[in-house]
Image (cartoon, rainbow, N blue to C red):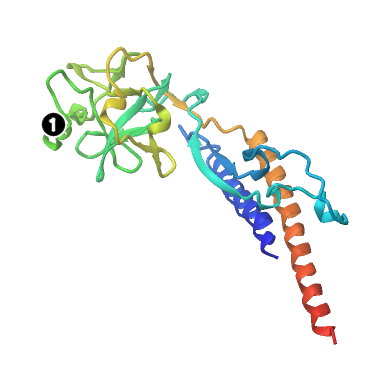
Amino acid sequence: MKNIWVPVSGQIAQQRKVETIANNIANANTAGFKRDEITFKEHLTAYSQTPDNIDLPRKEWNPDDFYRTQGAENAFVKVDGTYTDFQQGALSPTGNKLDIALFGKGLFEVLTPNGVRYTRKGTFGLNKEGEIVNENGYKLLSKLQPGQNLEAGTINSRVIKIPNQGQISISKEGRVFSPEGELATISVVEFKDHHALRKEGSSLFINNADDNTKRENIATTVNQGYVEGSNVNAIREMSELIKAHRQFEAIQKAVKTYDSISGKIANDIANLK
């Protein structure tokens, strides 16, 4: 009964799909969250081989002579990978001067203990040093100036600090102003290939290829006093979750049927005299 691994592989894949959808639903109200999608890969031997010509055997025929599956019964399924859907989320006004939403394909640059990361979550505040940080204490970075590089010393000098915990205003281009004048320009980075980014947690992304980064001629706008909502459609995700559960249950019934057949065969063989 080695073919039992065919439905088992489908069951494992469906379980991963359920977990992915459940995570999307759990973050439906997380600001800046981008939903994940899972893809499957199936090995279909019936379609990977050229069908043979009809060959009628010169012998007494039996059903096996006409049952040409071409290995289709060994069509295994596995998870090929996941990708992030970067579709724009809706912008909602908050009235908070340090809530910043992006409209476009860009991401903020923030400094974490593990280095620079990128995020769409623009719910910021001020720490006791007057630096703009998110809820995890990760510092918002200013735009990389001509001649600057990504070395640690340069990164620390790009942290945006508000003097005297004062009031600020932010333009659509990300320029930060205080009553004393212009302080910095928020670093908003776009990428040539968003699918090359790797997700870290629910709202951070890692970019491992510097040549994938686009820092000039950015079309993304910065919107002060707004928060970008999640791009998860809760109704659609719930519908997909119900469908995935039903498929999982259908496959589970097939596995139980295989198990029942195996048990019956074992019992019948044991009863042979």
User: Seen from this angle, which residue lies furthest bottom?
Assistant: 273
Q: Position of residue 216 (x, y in %)?
A: 27, 15
Q: Quadrant of residue 105?
A: top left
Looking at the image, residue 111 lies above or below residue 176: below
> Dot 1 lies on which element?
helix
Q: Amino acid at mark 1?
A: Thr
User: Looking at the image, can residue 27 be seen?
Assistant: yes
Q: Is residue 245 above or below residue 238?
A: below
Which image quarter is the C terminus in?
bottom right
Considering depth in this image, is 21 or 57 the residue closer to the camera? Answer: 57
Provide residue 172's location: percent of width, then percent of height. Answer: 35, 13
Q: How many marks?
A: 1
Residue 49 screen position, x and y as percent: 64, 40
Q: Residue at x 41, y 45 (%)?
A: 201
Q: According to the image, label 1 marks what residue?
A: 154
Give the vertical position of 49 relative to 100 (above or below).
Answer: below
The percent coordinates of residue 152 (x first, y second) are: 14, 37
